Amino acid sequence: MNKYKIKSFCKINLTLRVIKKLNNGYHAIKSLVTFCNLHDLILIKKIKGSKDKIVFSGTFKNGINKTSNTVSKLLRILRKKKLLRDQVFYINIKKNIPHGSGLGGGSSNAAHLLTFLNLKMSLKLNKKKIREIATKIGFDVSICLKKENIFLTGYKNKVVKISNFLNLVVLIVYPNLSCSTKEIYKKNKNFSNLTKEKNFSKKNKKEIIRYLINESNDLQEAAIKIHPKIANIINFIKFQKGCYFSRITGSGSACIGIFSDVKHAIYAKKLIKMKFPKYWCVLSKTI
């Protein structure tokens, strides 16, 4: 096996409605999910020895548990199922996606590596088996298996794929703090009703934008209660020219602003860097 490079793309929750808590400990949610061109880079190759070597590098390498991260969990599951036999790997994950930001970096790492290993190592896992393994690692891992615009309906296992037409300009601001998803959900008091799923297949971009503007993230209030600085970022972004709306993604702490065009987003980024010079800020596009 040669050295391979795998791009692991960033997940964005454009909307997020919490319906109820399920028996498996997760929550049923309604969410419009997309992916953008911000990505981690995974380098993998076979090595001799008895133990995998997993290394984290890059801007956001700190704060990741070296033994219970998503990649380690994936390898343990595959070995327990005797799918990797005696093969050992060196894996270097260059972290460009901040940890604990709601951008799904860890989930994306596991999902893309699982897809890669299934193909290159001839694991012969069908879609159902891949999804079962992904779910054991974390809720968002199965969502990250494919770079598709999807609508989580809130109904059990029901996902609606959306035509690839979003083409959104996304400004992401990360305030250098990690949100605990478990803590945010525990603090959350906002729950939405389960309504009839939206049919996006024939919608154009303007109609999608209108829908998104009128939507929200139920977890935002809880995230702000724990980390008040998030409110300052959201308010600053949403008042910039060309910004359709601003909110957290996932359970935070990253805040996103969706802009009408790149020119306005670039100018907003400059103002944000002046207002919050210590915060990480990047301009991206959906893919």
Image (tube, helix red, strand yellow):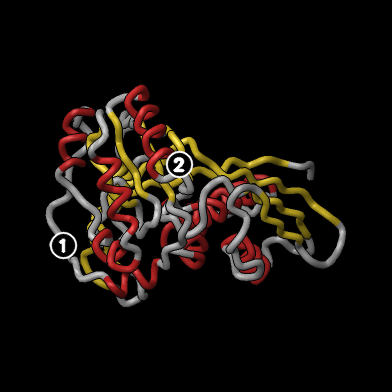
Q: Secondary structure at mark 1?
A: loop
Characterize the local packing of mark 1: few (<14), some (14-19) or many (20 or more) Cα atoms within 10 angstroms: few
- Residue under label 1: 192
**Towards the viewer: 231 or 246:** 231
**In the visual, does 175 lie left or right of 92?**
left
First in sequence: mark 1 vs mark 2? 1
- Residue under label 2: 281
Find the residue positioned furthest to the top. Answer: 263
**Towards the viewer: 276 or 261:** 276
Residue at 45% over, 41% down = 281
**Towards the viewer: 91 or 200:** 91
Find the residue positioned furthest to the right. Answer: 48
What is the x, y in percent for residue 124?
Answer: 61, 52
Q: Amino acid at mark 1?
A: Ser
Residue at 21% over, 65% down = 19
Whether residue 220 is situated above or below residue 167 in the rendered picture:
below
Give the total of numbered labels.
Answer: 2
**In the visual, does 209 lie left or right of 133?**
left
Q: Quadrant of residue 263?
A: top left
Q: Amino acid at mark 2?
A: Cys
